[in-house]
Amino acid sequence: MMVLESTSLRQGRALHRLLEIMGRRFLMGHSLSKPSLDRPLWALALASYALKPDDAQAVIESAWSMVHAPRSRELLGLDQPPAIFEQAGHALAIEREWSDASAAVIRPDWVCIGPQAIRIIDFKWRCLSSELSDYAAQLSRYQQALQDKAAGHAISSWILTADGEVWMLEEGRLVHCQVAGRPAS
């Protein structure tokens, strides 16, 4: 039985794929050049999502904006070159599988691991108010699983959306933040 996915759902999955590739390229020392449908790497990465050219371009623009907004760059660990990032004792886990206390597999989109702190980042195409409690529960599971493995690290969890929203997990609920990372009023 064939299941049809909405354009937004396919765009969200495509966004995850582009950000995964961009992150891996960053770790390999490649510059973060803007993806283009004219380049085979990016065209192939987006091909399986069956997006119209305008929808695929919207994904590219969103991914590019996400890795270049100052607050996002800081949260993602992209605000310094990879060599300096690693010399400072940081590591980046992209789409890595971890197990929680019940041995269930979790797969955060992006985990920035520093000497004293861990930032869990989840990417969303959009964050609807009806989804906030589910997303908060998802990030809480991620946070608990990583806390069990990284005692002594301060752990924070964040959601970055394609339209530039930043959400922070605080006391089990998501708080909408401005670009500067301060709670929105």
Image (tube, rainbow, N blue to C red):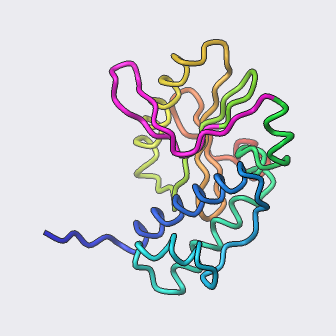
Horizontal and vertical percent position of residue 131: 42, 50
Q: Quadrant of residue 133?
A: top left
Q: Nearer the viewer, residue 183 or 48?
A: 48
In the picture, which quadrant includes the N terminus? bottom left
Please, which residue is most extreme toward the left here? Answer: 1
Q: Nearer the viewer, residue 50 or 127?
A: 50
Horizontal and vertical percent position of residue 35: 67, 73
Residue beneath the point at 68% across and 60% down: 66
Residue beneath the point at 50% across and 55% down: 127
Say whether residue 42 is magenta: no
Relative to 72, 40 lies left or right: left
Residue range of the region highlighted in magenta in the rendering: 89-111
Whether 167 is drawn above or below 45: the answer is above
Horizontal and vertical percent position of residue 170: 60, 31
Q: Quadrant of residue 175?
A: top right
Relative to 159, 183 lies left or right: right
Please, which residue is most extreme toward the top here? Answer: 152
Whether 113 is drawn above or below 51: the answer is above
Residue beneath the point at 76% across and 62% down: 32
Whether 57 is drawn above or below 151: the answer is below
Q: Quadrant of residue 137?
A: top left
Horizontal and vertical percent position of residue 153: 67, 19
Residue beneath the point at 80% across and 46% down: 82
Say whether residue 104 is magenta: yes
Q: How many marks?
A: 0
